[in-house]
Image (spheres, grey):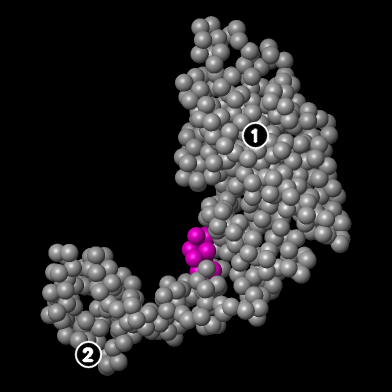
């Protein structure tokens, strides 16, 4: 209150033009150019009067000069904020509109105008709508949260009615992608559900949205809803051999990893693989091949997994990063399949590449799942110090994500890595936390998996436990509550890993991941480039 009173007293000492310039500057930004501040403030006077007003503000100490001529900044952010909120709401709306118009006249990029359009554009303003879409599209690859904001503002400007529904649908798809890429999965799903409602009668687009929505539901742990959605979508297809069928079947293969039903995963993935090859979608073919290898290895069928794994690796390594960015889950599933086949070095490289491309393109939804995959591959490959460091990073990221499924996975992995490193206290603490959290999730795979590191660590905490007790390394889990022990106990005690070429050491089914939106985009839809 004292600051507000002191500021009000300073303002009372100013002339009318100086107050208008100051108000315009509070709208234009900090720092700002004198011409934009004058336009925003509605100063319809000659330049000498504008500069005289600026001198008055400089003398009063409310603003200061910068190293760039004709640009000035406020004395303190609190001063700008106090002036801005002392202005009437109507005055601020008009000032933002004037600032946007001045920037447009100067040819300023859409990103600089978006903030002002957000606060001043009216429903039905097509020019403002187009500018906001441009700003969102530019921001989508590097700043998806900002892109989501501009897409939402653009949606707000659309009038109600069927005529605007086509535009609305065209914005909702990239909006959902931006939301998911910035970690807002629940909000992204809600947008896609609305898009599905608007896409009635648009068969191909509806199928792609269905697959995307299911992918997000998998990330959120809503696996039953995803499965039902995918099966409904598949039953409505008129072309059982088209790209849409392959996309749905690939996502059904992912669903099988969660149930878990690895036979189902292999069946759907093999069918998707055949169709993807026929329609020429190399990335979908890589994803499907990796999923077949993932499922077959989880069933202990290494010979069946091997050719699919080799095909996926060869195809993926020939792709440019820009191509991989359009379907990042290809790198994710290949990394996991390689991990289960004990090709830990290859798995680490493909996880690292996927993470790098994700970050470079602003697609954050799959970074944490790939970091978790990299963590286990590092530990299984004997790089325990790196694995322990990454485990801490993953746990921090999972806690910030608000995603219970990711947090349970991160705790599970920390427990497993700690067990390998001999840190019994951390292994027990993390494993028990993972188990408690996993019991709250829809599917119970994680609950079964989370108990394994606890059972591994407890013998180590007892006298003589290091050498005399059997250690149960987390393995692929079937539908029962018992782990499948595919290695001999002596090998397990001696090396912590199975024989070369076996499908050992897997945690198949507890952390599949998918790219929300990868299936919603094929070629350009509604005349817009897919942004995710």
Res 49 label? 2
**Res. 444 mark:** 1
Secondary structure character of the magenta stretch overall: helix
Q: What stretch is highlighted in magenta?
A: 142-151
For the point 16% across and 85% down, the residue is 15
Where is residue 19? Give x, y as percent: 22, 81
Front residue of 241 and 157: 157
Residue at 58% x, 33% y: name it. Answer: 439
Task: Pick the quarter of the image with the C terminus.
Answer: bottom right
Which quadrant of the view contains residue 372? top right
Instruction: Measure how far apart labels 1 and 2 are at the Cα level.
Output: 73 Å
Quadrant (top left/top right/bottom left/bottom right) for the N terminus: bottom left
Residue 78 highlighted magenta (yes or no): no
Taking the spot 64% from the left edge, 70% from the top edge, the residue there is 169
Number of numbered discs: 2
SS under mark 2: helix
Q: Can residue 524 be seen in this view?
A: no
How crowded pointer 1 is (Cα within 10 Å; few <14, some 14-19, many 20+) is rated as some
**Rendered residue at 83%/42% (across/down):** 267
Q: Is residue 193 above or below residue 432?
A: below
Residue situated in front as seen by the camera: 328 or 23: 23
Between disc 1 and disc 2, the foreground one is 1
Relative horizontal placement of residue 192, taking residue 116 as reference (left or right): right
Secondary structure beneath disc 1? loop
């Amino acid at each position: 209150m004292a600051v507000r009173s002191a500021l009000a007293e300073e303002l009372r000492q100013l002339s009318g033009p100086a107050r208008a310039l100051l108000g315009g500057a509070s709208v234009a930004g900090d720092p700002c150019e004198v011409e934009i501040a004058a336009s925003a403030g509605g100063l319809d006077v000659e330049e000498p009067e504008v500069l005289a007003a600026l001198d008055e503000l400089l003398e009063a100490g409310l603003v200061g000069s910068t190293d760039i001529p004709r640009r000035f900044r406020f004395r303190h952010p609190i001063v700008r904020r106090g002036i801005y909120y002392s202005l009437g709401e109507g005055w601020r709306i008009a000032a933002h509109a004037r600032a946007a118009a001045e920037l447009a006249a100067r040819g300023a990029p859409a990103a600089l105008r978006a903030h002002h359009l957000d606060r001043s554009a009216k429903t039905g303003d097509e020019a403002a709508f187009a500018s906001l879409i441009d700003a969102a599209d530019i921001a989508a690859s590097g700043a998806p949260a900002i892109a989501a904001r501009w897409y939402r503002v653009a949606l707000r400007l659309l009038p109600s009615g069927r005529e605007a529904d086509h535009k609305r649908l065209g914005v909702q798809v990239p909006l959902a992608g931006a939301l998911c890429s910035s970690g807002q999965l629940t909000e992204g799903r809600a947008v896609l559900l609305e898009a599905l409602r608007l896409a009635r009668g648009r068969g191909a687009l509806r199928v792609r949205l269905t697959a995307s929505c299911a992918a997000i539901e998998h990330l959120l742990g809503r696996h039953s809803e995803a499965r039902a959605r995918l099966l409904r979508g598949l039953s409505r297809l008129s072309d059982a051999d088209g790209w849409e069928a392959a996309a749905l079947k690939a996502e059904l293969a992912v669903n099988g990893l969660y149930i878990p039903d690895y036979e189902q995963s292999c069946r759907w993935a093999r069918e998707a693989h055949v169709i993807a090859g026929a329609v020429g979608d190399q990335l979908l073919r890589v994803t499907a091949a990796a999923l077949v290898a993932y499922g077959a290895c989880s069933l202990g069928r290494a010979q069946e997994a091997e050719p699919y794994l080799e095909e996926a690796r060869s195809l993926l390594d020939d792709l440019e990063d820009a191509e991989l960015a359009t379907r990042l889950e290809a790198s994710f599933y290949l990394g996991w399949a390689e991990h289960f086949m004990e090709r830990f070095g290859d798995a680490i490289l493909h996880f690292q590449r996927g993470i790098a491309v994700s970050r470079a393109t602003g697609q954050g939804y799959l970074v944490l799942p790939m970091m978790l995959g990299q963590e286990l591959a590092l530990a299984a490959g004997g790089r325990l110090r790196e694995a322990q460091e990454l485990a801490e990073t993953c746990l921090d990221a999972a806690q910030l994500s608000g995603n219970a499924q990711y947090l349970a996975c991160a705790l599970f992995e920390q427990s497993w890595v700690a067990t390998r490193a001999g840190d019994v206290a951390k292994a027990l603490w993390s494993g028990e936390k993972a188990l408690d959290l996993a019991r709250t999730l829809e599917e119970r795979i994680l609950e079964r998996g989370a108990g394994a590191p606890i059972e591994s660590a407890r013998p180590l905490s007892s006298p003589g436990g290091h050498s005399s007790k059997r250690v149960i390394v987390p393995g692929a889990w079937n539908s029962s509550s018992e782990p499948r022990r595919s290695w001999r106990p002596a090998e397990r005690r001696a090396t912590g890993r199975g024989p070369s070429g076996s499908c050992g050491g897997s945690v198949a089914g507890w952390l599949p991941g998918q790219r929300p939106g990868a299936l919603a985009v094929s070629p350009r839809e509604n005349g817009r480039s897919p942004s995710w």
